[in-house]
Image (tube, rainbow, N blue to C red):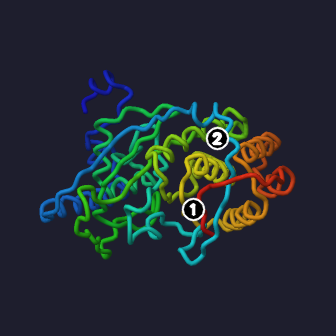
Amino acid sequence: MSIGAIEKFPEMPTVNFNKLYGDGFSQVKIEKMKCLFKALEHATTDTLHSIVKIWRSSPSMRHFFNNSEAFSVSINPYNKDTAGNNIGMDSYMFRNNAQNPRKYFVVDFANCMIGGGVLGHGAVQEEILFVEHPDCIAARCVMPKMEANESIIIEGARKTCSHLGYANQFEFDRISTTDLSPPTNSILGRVFVCINATDYSKRKQDQYHIDEIRRELIKALSGFSAFGIPQNCVTGNWGCGAFGGDETLKALIQILAASMAYLESINYCCFGKVKLHADLKLLIGELKNHRTTVGEYFRAMVKTAEAVKIGRAFKMTDFLHSKLPRRINFELFPQIYV
């Protein structure tokens, strides 16, 4: 994309690879190019033909926020350890669903410009996802900047390589071999739900305000409810890390969005965060013992968040022990495996 095109369409991501090939040397860029060359190798030898669907989801929020019945639905986490872990310590979001990628959608911790720094220096969750599944890069050609109530869905992106490390330690895994399974239908590969969190790195206290919580909830809900039928979800510490999101609060927001979207299960990867892992297991236990409606959960979350002092973090114990009402009146919510 030329400079003129960027000026004419400022809401579109760049699609040229010139920043990856040039614009300053870095080892991360070299490793990314190795990943993309591996994809080209697959493209020249693979006889399978697949379909990749890229679409934008912006469901009406009226059903969720102007409907008293939606807030009276209760959260009911089922505990099925034998089904496979799952609020886990895993740092790799694809491992637990590798055998059946079409059974789950994976949350892409997206940039508002889809793909983020995939064609530059970036090498965190979204950029790694895109170089391992390079079909995703095509979304940059057709999807402008996401609005606050929008998500982008990518179906059928096939994995063509593996990686080691993260950020500045990212590298192409030349030893690992990628299994390109025979097609079972016309759409192969994984399903990604791309949602961009708000950047709180320079104003962390803002995220505890009700308007900010509502924005993140609507964003997650736009992706989780995109399919119109119950789904299974793989997610993790969305909007944390470089964006400065509170890990506990973001987990609670995603669990609430999953409830409102009637997801069947959440496979939550804690990325080695020991305290978060313990907090979420505590949450599951409390929600099993004390049935709570969506509305009660939301009000408790907002009340706890707005009480967070400057320089402190959201405490799960405050949310659970002091704020959650004790009511029994519900029918359904997704299975959240522990």
In the picture as drawn, the residue positioned furthest to the top comes out as: 8
N-terminal-most mark, 2 or 1: 2
Picture coordinates of residue 31, whole percent (x, y):
33, 60
For the point 58% across and 52% down, the residue is 241
Q: Is residue 309 above or below residue 89?
A: above
Picture coordinates of residue 98, whole percent (x, y):
40, 69
Q: Nearer the viewer, mark 2 or mark 1?
A: 2
Q: For residue 268, which numbered disc appears in the image? A: 1
For the point 23% across and 63% down, the residue is 38
For the point 65% across and 36% down, the residue is 214
Position of 12 with respect to 241 (left or right) is: left
Q: Secondary structure at mark 1?
A: strand
Instruction: Please state which of residues 296 and 108 is positioned toward the viewer in this rendering.
Output: 296
Instruction: Please state which of residues 129 and 165 is positioned toward the viewer in this rendering.
Output: 129
Q: For residue 70, which numbered disc appears in the image? A: 2
Give the quadrant of the N terminus.
top left
Position of 94 with respect to 65 (left or right) is: left
Q: Is residue 165 above or below residue 246?
A: below
In the picture as drawn, the residue positioned furthest to the right comes out as: 322
Position of 7 with respect to 211 (left or right) is: left
For the point 66% across and 54% down, the residue is 331
Picture coordinates of residue 237, whole percent (x, y):
58, 55
Picture coordinates of residue 52, whole percent (x, y):
27, 50
Q: Secondary structure at mark 2?
A: helix
